[in-house]
Image: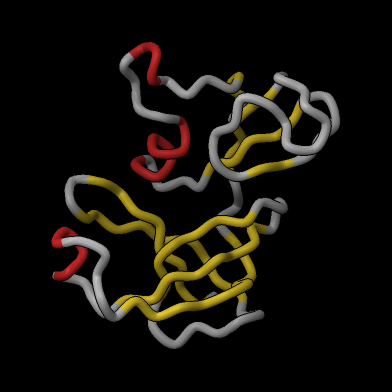
Amino acid sequence: MSHDRADDGAQHGAMHPYAAGLAAGLVRYQVCEDCGEAQSLGRHACHFCGSVRLAWRDASGLATVHSVTEVVRAPDESFQSIAPYTLVLATLDEGPRVMAHAEPGVTIGERVRATFFQHGGRTLLRFRRE
């Protein structure tokens, strides 16, 4: 598990820790070092207690699907080549909820595992059935 201090990397010209994790085949989340709450995305303070003592951790990659939607009409040209596609909100076993692509046909409550794919020069998260 990674214990890097919270730093979005942008000030140093480096890749954001979440994006760097995806590129390395990992799902990352933040944990508050004061209250222990986990949160997705990169925040400057804990959403629960307000502490700025945050650290990035690597998730197991296992999650439960919370919601599902099928995107038929791509939001822009870069996604037209993969439409239609499935998006989910999935709750990681560690607690945070993330949005990601998913294999078609996944359902709410289903157990999934993180996989990754390249699109438009970026690594994106895709969940597959466990």
Image position of 51 with respect to 111: above or below: above
> In this rendering, would 78 be left or right of 3?
left
Point out residue 97 in the picture as x, y percentages from the top left corner.
Answer: 62, 56
The residue located at (16%, 69%) in the rendering is 80
Query: Which residue in the rendered view is the most extreme toward the top?
Result: 12
Quadrant in which the C terminus is drawn:
bottom right
Side of 11 where 36 appears, left or right: right
- Residue 19 % position (x, y): 39, 39
Colour option used: secondary structure
Number of numbered tags placed on the structure image: 0
Foreground pick, 83 / 55: 83
Q: Is residue 111 left or right of residue 99?
A: right
Residue at x-position 39% and y-position 80%: 70
At 30% from the left and 49% from the top, the residue drawn is: 123
The N terminus lies in quadrant:
top right
User: Can you name the residue that lies furthest to the bottom here?
Assistant: 105
Residue 42, picture quadrant: top right
> Residue placed at 21% from the left, 55% from the top?
119
- 117 or 9: nearer the eye? 9
Dividing the picture into quadrants, the one containing residue 79 is bottom left
Q: Is residue 130 above or below residue 95?
A: below
Q: Position of residue 103 (x, y in %)?
A: 39, 77
Picture coordinates of residue 40, whole percent (x, y): 60, 45
